[in-house]
Amino acid sequence: MLNKTFSTAFSSWAAVLVEKRMRRHAMARVLAKMSQTHYAMAFERWLGWMEELAGMRTKLRKCAQKMRNRGLAAAFTGWAVLLTESKDRQQLLKKVVLRIQNAKLARVYHGWLFRVEEMKKFRFLLGKGMANM
């Protein structure tokens, strides 16, 4: 009988101990979840801040690209204007050179014509003078 009482008491005590351990373990899990929830909330806030920062960086990069593109566009436009002006000057210079060359050719041609006319007159006079001799 005494053993039976001790056995029942021991079994009850062991059951209470197992129950206590289970409750302690459950409480530890609940507390861990609660503390992890705190960390999780902090992590979520940090993650949101990082996403916002990444968005701001993207916007800033796009803005800088637009500013650079405007500068590049202005530089390209200036270069295109200079190129057009340079081509116009080259064409004008070619025209001037051609006019000068044409003027020289015209003077040479007119000089040649004048000499041909003089030679004709000279031959005519020479022929007339030979005929009179």
Image (cartoon, rainbow, N blue to C red):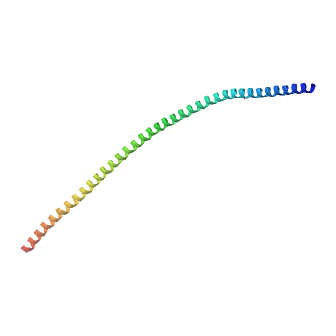
Q: Residue at x 64, y 30 (%)?
A: 43
Name the spot of residue 55 as percent of width and height, x first: 53, 33
* Residue at figure coordinates x 21%, y 58% from the top left: 106
Instruction: Say left or right for 3 vs 51.
Output: right
Q: Does 117 appear above or below 28?
A: below
Viewer-closest of 50 and 60: 50
Q: Nearer the viewer, residue 29 or 85?
A: 29
Residue 100: x %, y % from top left: 26, 54
Single out the residue that lies furthest toward the right. Answer: 2
Residue at image position (9%, 73%) is: 130
Q: Residue at x 44, y 41 (%)?
A: 72
**Residue at the extreme left:** 132
> Height in image: 130 above or below 85?
below
Total of numbered circles in the picture? 0
Q: Position of residue 133 (x, y in %)?
A: 7, 75
* Outermost residue, front side: 1
In the rendered view, would you say 92 is above or below 43?
below
Name the quarter where the N terminus is drawn.
top right
Residue 37, percent across and down?
66, 28
- The correct choice, above or below, for 119 with respect to 45 in the image is below
Q: Is residue 39 left or right of residue 5?
A: left
Q: Nearer the viewer, residue 116 or 102?
A: 102
Residue 69, quarter of picture: top left
> Observer-nearest residue: 90 or 122?
90
